Amino acid sequence: MSVARSRTDRIGNEARTLRLRYLRRSEERDRNRYAPLAPSVVLETQHRERVMLALLRRAGLTSVTGQRLLDVGCGGGTELVRWVARGLKPTDAFGVDLLSSRLSPARELHPSIHLVQGNGAELPFRNATFDIVTQFVVFSSILDPGVRRQAAAEIERVLRPSGHLIWYDFWLNPTNRDTRGVRVDEIRRLFPNCRGQFRSLTLAPPLSRLIAPRSWLLASILKELRPFQTHYLGVLTKSG
């Protein structure tokens, strides 16, 4: 079997198992946990927003006007709509997701955003198409190391030189057997042509869901303490 055929088979197998895992999660999950106004979700979103904007300023990005952005694993389009609120033109916002059912809510949120059903390891875009590429909690769901490397290579391919990759994902998630955390050293190996900074953040979701509705102050204190944080957020810039 050729190397190309083997890689295609691995990507296809991982995509099929990912679809099944996503479908199972959508059936099992308590949707109230992820409601936009749930205290734990508000706590996470506000903290992530503050850290991300600080990292973007350090990377020299102070405006998204005129930028083209791709969200890999865009789901229901919530993050894309946030970028539009930050000044991105809707027609410059692109999202790709493995499941077509996850794209339907995104189309309802903003019909001008470009949405494509596709695989992150085989992105349907030309080289150097985007100024910004984002991935939020996608790579931790890709369990095959080879497919992870291919997805990373695809992101680097479609990102223009001096463009920015925004990464947000678990490094630790012991309660979910369908994920494998990604640490900073692996992220740097996955994206050898990108350099940037990372911050540890996000109060462990089980703790956040338990504490934030009862004591916002306590949850706000714990989220700043490294032992209770489960995610990394990074802004990486592709070499020019």
Image: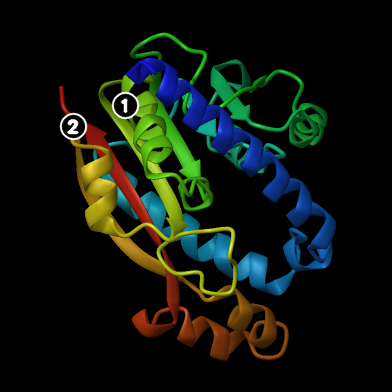
Q: Secondary structure at mark 1?
A: helix
Which of the numbered marks, if any, corresponds to residue 139?
Answer: none
**Mark 2 or mark 1: which comes first in sequence?**
1
The type of residue carrying mark 2 is: Asn
The part of the image, by quadrant, that contains residue 64 is top left
Q: In this rendering, does residue 58 appear at all?
A: no
Residue at image point 40% right, 29% down: 132
Which of the numbered marks, if any, corresponds to residue 156?
Answer: 1
Residue at image point 41% right, 68% down: 201
The part of the image, by quadrant, that contains residue 25 is bottom right
Q: In this rendering, does residue 47 appear at all?
A: yes
Provide residue 113's location: percent of width, then percent of height: 66, 21
Provide residue 117's location: percent of width, then percent of height: 67, 23
Residue to which mark 2 is pinned: 193
For residue 237, side relative to residue 112 (left or right): left
Residue at image point 42% right, 36% down: 147
Q: Is residue 61 above or below residue 130?
A: below
The type of residue carrying mark 1 is: Glu
